[in-house]
Amino acid sequence: MDSLHFEPISGKEAHAEFVALLNSCFPVPRGHSFLEDFPVWGVLEPDTHFYIGGYSSGRLVAAAAARTAELITEGAPLPIGLIGAVATHSSCRGRGFASQATAQVLDWLARRRVALAVLWGSEHELYRRMGFELCGIQTTLPLWQLQLPSDAPRPGRGWVPGLWERLKRRGSGLQYGEKDRSWLEAHANVQWYWLGEPSKPTAYAALGRGIDLGGLVHEWGGDPEALRSLLSAVRAEVPGAALLGSPRLFEKFRLVCSPGTPVPEEQFLCMARFMALSEDPERVYSLLGEKGASPLWFWGLDGA
């Protein structure tokens, strides 16, 4: 193999090669695309998205992506960076190419003065060497364990305009703007459930996302009473489904387990690395969950 060189991935042709690499590196069913589950990496917007490719003999063999965003906190929104789509061709693994690609997107995020860089991945030791640490807390609650109404209503299904309005007003996760709407609507494998009117749902829940969130209700909200009724309807249709969230969110929406059910196990949410501290360093520190009232949390569609 010739020496590896990195350059930004720009233009539709180069981006199509990037998507083909992702399709070959992740468990994507034949005839489908990685972007069906992660359409955010299909956005070609240089102000907010960056794609880097490692090339050998003119062939793309490694890649990584990053985007800037704002995290909702109890103070002002916090500028952060999310890293994803880190991939190396199967013939080139074990040579440090993923680390090199990740380093490139970290440099891009550093120039944009984000406070934190966040990623999801199982290669914890690799990312620890790059300054990342596990942080945030999440819990998975099987729906059958929850105390929910026994009479399940008939929910609406599919994406409707009112869901966008609800997502924009979430009190946690990423702050969405109008440019986010197209890729949020493009999640091909998310099953949306809602109650109320299509233009103004009283509660909503999103089930599944293919590669990494199958069987999980990972996006949910609305009126607490309506939400519990909606989750009852989801449970009736998908008995094995589970609810993904933070302990504080479960408390806020009064979602509790039935007596005698197993105590849910808490897991780390993601890995994060300090990039540049904001004007209020204590607020940034508190997001990592060690203290303060705003532990780090992302909803399912926020994950890169």
Image: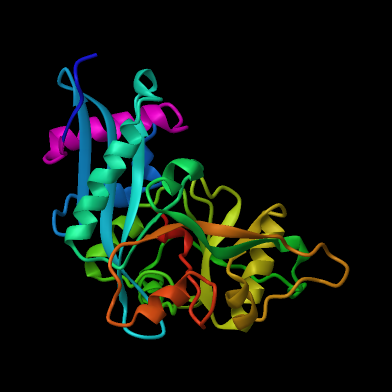
Instruction: Answer whether residue 248 is visible to the viewer in this image.
Output: yes
Question: In the displayed structure, would residue 292 be above or below residue 184?
Answer: below
| Scheme of colours in the image | rainbow
* Residue occupying the point 37% across, 39% down: 34
Q: Residue at x 30, y 62 (%)?
A: 275
Question: Which image quarter: residue 252?
Answer: bottom right
Residue 53 lies left or right of residue 118; in this view the side is left
Identified at 15% across, 21% down, the residue is: 58
Residue at x 77% of width, y 71% of height: 257
Q: Residue at the top extreme?
A: 1
In-image side of 16 versus 300 (left or right): left
Q: Between 273 and 11, which is closer to the camera in this rendering?
A: 273
Count of labels shown?
0
Picture quadrant of residue 147: bottom right
Residue 134 percent across, percent down from the top left: 51, 56
Quadrant where the image shows the N terminus: top left
Residue 62 is inside the magenta segment: no
- As drawn, is 174 to the left or to the right of 214? left
Q: Residue furthest right?
A: 260
Depth order, front residue of 102/65: 102
Residue that protrudes farthest toward the left in the picture: 11
Residue 287: image x %, image y %?
Answer: 45, 73
- Nearest the viewer among 304 and 115 is 115
In the image, the segment drawn in magenta is 7-30
Where residue 182 appears, x then y in whole percent? Answer: 27, 58
The one of 184 and 269 positioned closer to us in this rendering = 269
Task: Please tell me in which quadrant of the rendered image residue 54 appears.
Answer: top left
Vertical arrangement, residue 295 with respect to residue 105, above or below: below
Taking the image as drawn, is residue 42 in sight?
no
Is residue 11 inside the magenta stretch?
Answer: yes
- Across and down, in percent, residue 119 comes to 40, 53
